[in-house]
Image: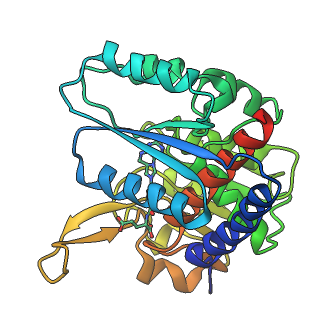
Amino acid sequence: MKILDGQLVSQATKDELKIKVAQLVAEGKKVPHLAAILVGTNGASETYVGSKVRTCEEIGFRSTLVRLEDTISEYKLLETIEQLNNDMDVDGILVQLPLPKHISDEKVINAIHPSKDVDGFHPVSVGKMVQSLPTFIPATPHGIMLMLEHYKINTKGMHAVVIGRSNIVGRPMSILLSANTNPGNCTVTICHSATKNLKELCLQADIIVAALGRPEFVTADMVKDGAIVIDVGITRVADATKKRGYALKGDVQFDTVSPKCSWITPVPGGVGPMTIAALMKNTYNACLTKH
Ligand SMILES: Nc1nc(=O)c2c([nH]1)NC[C@@H]1CN(c3ccc(C(=O)N[C@@H](CCC(=O)O)C(=O)O)cc3)C=[N+]21
């Protein structure tokens, strides 16, 4: 069993970007600028946005964090996005999800100009991704592809089973893995809450991507010997023995599953850090395309 080390690959990706930013500076060019909007005070969202902003600083990007009260009107949020759309210095705009219930995710995502849609959630970006055209790829699936690429894992012809059909992970992951690329070229099965024979399908998988958000859902009896297991889950589970009062649990029962795998991602230190690295890559590309 070998570990797909998200911390390590993320660091390598950030180091590359750091050098590229230094080159931009040396040429007197503008550095990439990410604007993140955080609505409310969800603990996990605070952590993620905080580490996105910190990463920007680390590699020499500009960043702007816009904090809004969770009582903010949808209209005000849309107005804030419009201002960032029109701000020539801002290259990428990210609205951290989830949003409060009175705000429509769809309206917010649609309001971001596709040229600044570094999350890749806008319908224009999604449409291009489906057609394998150059575009912003959502950060989590993008990060997973970067990790497979880094370890030179040849996925051609493999059967990939993706558990979860969300717009931000499962669905785009299934599209990327089935594309005529390397990594890619997989035969993909996408599973969800209405799937009847999930265990049988998982047992046929050369690659399992667990992205359903249920801690330790994937157990050893569901995994074929030699499979590659990618764990996208990251749930905070109360644990008094931990400093922060919670432990992070993936969607995979790591201790029992890992001995069967050829490769597996840990939680934390797997997909999470790669998500951030991929977002930084998207932001760099947004800047290059525009200037
Ligand atoms: N508009 C938007 N874009 C996103 O990309 C987005 C989002 N909304 N909403 C929530 C999810 C989740 N997400 C993560 C980012 C970093 C870690 C990460 O760094 N995880 C660390 C641990 C972090 C911790 O200690 O909690 C790790 O796995 O090692 C995890 C998850 C981005 N998301």
In this view, 212 is above or below 250:
above
Say if residue 233 shows up in the picture: yes
In the image, 23: left or right of 170?
Answer: right
Residue 171 location, x and y as percent? Answer: 59, 38
How many numbered dots are placed on residues in this image?
0
Q: Quadrant of ligand 1?
A: bottom left
What residue sits 81% from the left and 43% below the top? 179
Decide which of 128, 68 is in the foreground and name it. 68
Residue 270 location, x and y as percent? Answer: 53, 70
Residue 185 location, x and y as percent? Answer: 84, 51
Q: How is the image coloured?
A: rainbow
What residue sits 35% from the left and 22% below the top? 77
Decide which of 225, 5 is in the foreground and name it. 5
In the image, 68: left or right of 180?
Answer: left
Name the residue at the left extreme. Answer: 240
User: In the rendered image, which quarter contains the N terminus?
Assistant: bottom right
What residue sits 33% from the left and 12% below the top? 75
User: In the rendered image, which quarter contains the C terminus?
Assistant: top right
Decide which of 218, 125 is in the foreground and name it. 125
In the image, 76: left or right of 42?
Answer: right
What residue sits 45% from the left and 62% below the top? 54
Name the residue at the front extreme. Answer: 28
Say if residue 161 shows up in the picture: no
Quarter-of-image position of residue 290: top right
Residue 65 location, x and y as percent? Answer: 40, 44
